[in-house]
Amino acid sequence: MANSIQDKLIDSLGTYDRGVKEQDFYVNRMNALPSVLVEMAYISNPNEETLLRSTTFRQKVATGIRKGLEEYFNNF
């Protein structure tokens, strides 16, 4: 699921692909359903903080996540 979401986010945003990482985060580990933690930008980076304030950027993120989920569940 994470790979599908990552691929579609990169397509939607046209950003650098930092890849998919696996971590043992509580929010994912304690979930009975498949889950993905998405970090679309970093507020500690002034340029990325500006992007996060943009409605257009947030809509592109949402579209990328939706398309990734659609791809994952259509091929499930």
Image: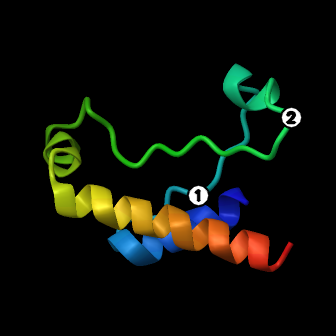
Residue 47, given in percent of the width and then of the height, sits at: 15, 46
**Label 1 belongs to which residue?**
19
Residue 66 left/right relative to 76: left
Residue 40, given in percent of the width and then of the height, sits at: 40, 49
Q: CA distance from mark 2 to mark 1?
A: 24 Å
- Give the image quarter of residue 63: bottom left
**Label 2 belongs to which residue?**
32
Front disc: 2 or 1: 2
Residue 55 left/right relative to 24: left
Question: Which residue type carries mark 2?
Answer: Ala
Question: Which residue type carries mark 1?
Answer: Gly
Circle 2: element type: loop
Structure colour scheme = rainbow
Circle 1: element type: loop
Residue at 32% across / 38% down in the picture?
A: 42
Dot 1: few (<14), some (14–19), or many (≥20) neighbours within 10 Å?
few
Residue at 82% across / 79% down in the picture?
A: 75
- Give the image quarter of residue 12: bottom left
> If you read the primary sequence from the N terminus, does the residue marked by circle 2 or circle 1 appear first?
1
Question: In this view of the protein, which residue sits in the foreground, 11 or 18?
Answer: 11
> Do the residues bearing badges 2 and 1 touch, measured as CB atoms within 8 Å?
no
Residue at 55% across / 73% down in the picture?
A: 67
Q: Is residue 68 above or below residue 51?
A: below
